Amino acid sequence: KAGVTQTPRYLIKTRGQQVTLSCSPISGHRSVSWYQQTPGQGLQFLFEYFSETQRNKGNFPGRFSGRQFSNSRSEMNVSTLELGDSALYLCASSLETGYNSPLHFGNGTRLTVT
Amino acid sequence: DQQVKQNSPSLSVQEGRISILNCDYTNSMFDYFLWYKKYPAEGPTFLISISSIKDKNEDGRFTVFLNKSAKHLSLHIVPSQPGDSAVYFCAASFTNAGKSTFGDGTTLTVKP
């Protein structure tokens, strides 16, 4: 069974631009979560989608948004990029939302904002 | 306010010895706890979990202990192997919410 696939692996953008990251969950997984990892910090929760609905949202500004499609694939968008948005963005899928389902992570998208 | 804390950024142990990674949490409503392992250039992978109704869960060389009164959990790896060298993240969640709250991670180095 294929794992969680994130594209692209690396991105370099300029301040003020916007970016879209893509995530394909494991087949059959309906929940997709997004996390941000910056150097020296743990994984900061961005949002979670289940059956195309946002179920949970972290403490990030409105520049960060996401969506989930009917095939469970998800996209994350960051508008008006700032230098501080440089990070590893991780997508994770799970069978269900809650219900103690462990997260299955992709290898992430490394975003660099210059 | 960081609800899940891993106070040791790094840990170094000798191969064959025990590795003990610690994690503290502040929200007593957390009822499910997980450990993930992360190698460089890869996403975290699920390692082991424990429900708040238990105080110990074992899976091969890995054992997680939960002390609810102290709001503390630990991961024991016995015996440690060089391949265990990675960043270990502790996470906590609520049963009916999909969001997991992660600690900052502990980098484990197992020396041959």
Image: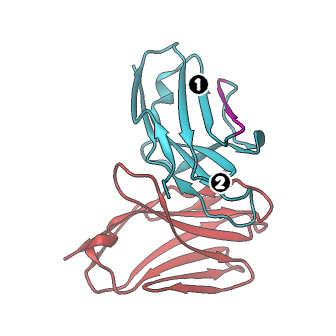
Chain colours: A cyan, B red
Res. B105 mark: none
Please tell me whether residue A12 is drawn above or below residue A51 in the rendered image: above
Res. A29 mark: 2
Q: Position of residue A93 (x, y in %)?
A: 61, 52
Q: Which residues are magenta?
A: A63-70
Please, what secondary structure does the residue beneath circle 2 have? loop
- Asked if the residue under mark 2 is in contact with the one under mark 1, i.e. CB atoms within 8 Å, the reply is no
Chain to which the residue tagged by mark 1 belongs: A
Residues flagged by tags 1 and 2 on a common chain? yes
Q: Nearer the viewer, residue B108 or A71?
A: A71
Give the dominant element type of the magenta stretch: helix, strand or loop.
strand
Res. A78 mark: 1
Q: Is residue A88 visible?
A: no
Pointer 2 local density, CA inside 10 Å: few below 14, some 14–19, many at least 20 = many
Q: Is residue A68 magenta?
A: yes
Q: Earlier in the sequence, mark 1 or mark 2?
A: 2
Q: Is residue A69 magenta?
A: yes
Pointer 1 local density, CA inside 10 Å: few below 14, some 14–19, many at least 20 = some
Q: Quadrant of residue A99?
A: bottom right
* Identity of the residue drawn at 29% across and 71% down: B83
Q: Quadrant of the C terminus of chain B?
A: bottom left
Q: Position of residue B22 (x, y in %)?
A: 51, 73
